[in-house]
Image: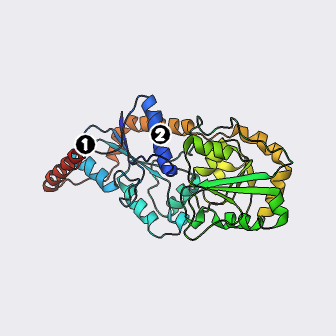
Amino acid sequence: MKISIGTKIKDGPWGGGNLFALNLSKFLKKEGFDVVFDLSHDDIDLILITEPRKTSESSSFTHWDVENYIKYVKNDTLVCHRINECDERKGTNFVNKYLIEANKVSDTTIFVSSWIKNLYIEQNISSKHNYVILAGADKDIFNPSARAKWDEETKLRIVTHHWGANWNKGFDVYKKIDEMLSEDFWNKKIDFTYIGNLPRKFEFKNSIHLPPMSGAELAREIKKNHIYITGSLNEPSGNHHIEGAQCGLPIMYIDSGGVKEYTKGFGVEFNVKNLEEKIIYLNENYEYYFKKIINYPFESSLMCSEYAKLFKDMMKIKTQLINEREILKVNKLFKKTYLLKRNFQYIKK
């Protein structure tokens, strides 16, 4: 089966969507799938839309490109749309409408949490052939091997990391921790490290700030710490806290977005008002959570196997899915123009 994933793969630290495409493509290739990242091939069996917005640097093709491919290149190609973004995450007002429109070309839809699925269902996205597949990180990199263990005498080291620098990534929380560290009590009790990009004009005064990292370098840095914290708001899934948990660090998390679906039972829920109280609680119950997090279940091979199974299941009901599509009207004049432009575009590359 030939699958096209709609992501432009980036080297180095970039974000959760990039890691998803890397992990999925690696897994599918091992399973015997033929994986490509554009629409230049005439024999694609299934297209996975990951980022249909052409303004995004990670977008390899849009839903319009997919629709034209089905109309004018191969009309029995199936389409799956992975949704992991929403207005609620960054305070925008156009993303949801755009993705709902983009979703009309898909035969199936994958959401990265039940929270984001319910959000879009309430906003009238198609309710047919919807699935929830939780995300995961590469366990060959993010695992508990050589993780630090707090000795209950030195400072408790707390860490988080983000590629995106939007304030909703949790900077109300991270700012508060930084302010806490100006107090003698907390300065003697904890250290806080932030890895990644910061909002414009924001800087830490008492915390450790490290540049964005990825892969083994990031895992090594995370494992130097004892507790992982995420203050991210309206996060559909989030890759950062998954990587922290897979590295064997108990999690502090806010009940917002889909994060709780990944963290419940493997750490402590908190909010900005009770943050200090919950740090003390985790300090006193560290050993319990340190042992429990070793059984954290979410990792990329599990996620990827669910994607592979869905793709195979789609092929089994291919005729049904195609018959359920809205009629795609073919404009013969546009078809000729489109094919000429398409051929020129990919030859030029």
Which of pointers 2 and 1 indicates the residue nearer the eye? 2
Q: Is residue 227 above or below residue 301?
A: below
Label whose residue precedes the other's in the sequence (2 or 1): 2
Judging depth in this view, the residue of 77 and 294 nearest the camera is 294
User: Which residue in the structure is indicated by mark 1?
Assistant: 74
Whether tag 2 and tag 1 are in contact, CB under 8 A, the answer is: no
Left or right, 126 with reference to 159 = left
Mark 2 → mark 1, Cα distance in angstroms: 24 Å
Q: Position of residue 203 (x, y in %)?
A: 62, 67
Q: How dense is the environment of label 1, judged by Cα within 10 Å: few (below 14), some, or many (20 and up)?
A: some
Dot 2: what SS?
helix
> Which residue is rendered at x = 64% and y = 65% of the image?
171
Report if residue 168 is visible in the image. yes
Judging depth in this view, the residue of 225 and 251 nearest the camera is 225
> Which residue is rendered at x = 60% and y = 69% of the image?
202
Q: Position of residue 129 (x, y in %)?
A: 45, 47
Dot 1: what SS?
loop
Q: Position of residue 47 (x, y in %)?
A: 36, 44
What's the residue type where badge 2 is placed? Leu
What's the residue type where badge 1 is placed? Lys
Left or right, 47 with reference to 306 = left
- Residue 24's disc number: 2
Q: Position of residue 243 (x, y in %)?
A: 62, 45
Judging depth in this view, the residue of 326 and 300 nearest the camera is 300
> Which residue is rendered at x = 53% and y = 69% of the image?
91
Left or right, 257 with reference to 14 = right
